[in-house]
Image (tube, rainbow, N blue to C red):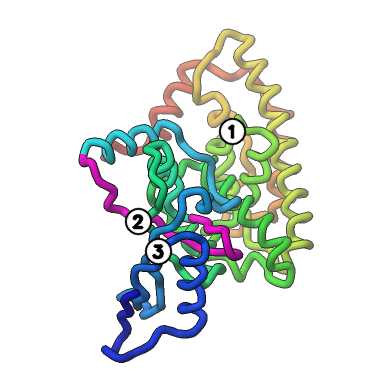
Amino acid sequence: MATWGRFPDEEAPKVVVALAEQVERDGGLALALYREPVGDHWHIFCLLPMDKVEPTPYQRDLSPTHAKRLQEVVKKIDRFVDPIVIMSPKPGLYWTPNGNHRRVVLEKLKCKLVPAILVPEPEVAFQILALNTEKAHNLKEKSLEVIRMYRGLVDDEPESGEEGYAFQFEAPHFITLGLLYEKNKRFAGGAFAPILRRVDKFLKGRFPKTLGEREERAELVREADEALVEVVAKIKKRGINHPYVKNFVLARTTPLTRQRKTLPSFDQTFKKLKENIEDFDIAKVRYEDIQRSAIMGAPAAG
């Protein structure tokens, strides 16, 4: 196999060579050991057996629509030009944190080998998940990916905590929303996200402890949502049907006004929000008010 380092006669570290040999034993081909150009880290360019490559257990669910579109493009150009990124948690098993749609396309096309860039450090998988841009995340996909990563870290890194993985999680409210989406895939995350973004912070402590605190936070949001669902149902019973109803009610019951310089705690915010929702006077709601709020709240074009 070829080796490219900083100097012509530079040898790859023993751990990288051993990993390349593992690839060969697993039925793959280690084509090159090289230093990538940004951080000068050693990587392995290889061909891996299709049946030994899987997605990480932490990432979002596959989009059949995106996979089908990608397959059509690959068939049209009649070649595969975009290697996937791979980690190896143990011999005989290879995970892709960035490339599962491409892996599925190759599988559907009955390819026996997967072109891959194998990264020797398994812990980098979490960082690559955060940079996954193969298909843009929506809020639910991102939140579910983060909570799956979180649950994996509870077992694999029990001495670590949220602040140490802030880069990988991107934002604390993704963790809370992930717990909510796990229980209810139809949860109105987009309606609650603006409030969560302001009061949800990374928790101090180790993962086994903070997971319990996260579940308590998710339960507070769930209780507020249950109250919101009841109010929305009553408004719709009056004949007022508009897709912005939930956002309208939340905008008028949130305890987080723009004028506030100091924000209440997470618990205070959602307990007060629930109270405000339960006390909301639906008799004063008019369709034109909701419609006007929807127009004002819509993002600007372009």
Give left or right: position of 266 versus 38.
Answer: right
Q: Is residue 135 visible?
A: no
Tag shown at residue 248? none
Q: Name above or below for residue 35 compared with residue 211.
A: below
Question: Residue type at mark 2?
Answer: Pro
Q: Which residues are magenta?
A: 77-96
Give the SS element for disc 2: loop
Figure quadrant of residue 28 = bottom left
Question: Residue type at mark 1?
Answer: Ala
- Relative to the observer, which residue lies in front, 18 or 70? 18
Q: Measure how far apart labels 2 and 3 are at the Cα level.
A: 14 Å
Estimate the x, y position of residue 196 in percent, counting from the top left.
Answer: 60, 48
Residue found at x 55% / y 36%: 191
Estimate the x, y position of residue 122 in percent, counting from the top left.
Answer: 55, 68
Q: Name above or below for residue 223 compared with residue 270.
A: above
Residue matched to label 1: 188
Figure quadrant of residue 36 = bottom left
Give left or right: position of 222 versus 260.
Answer: right
Residue matched to label 3: 29
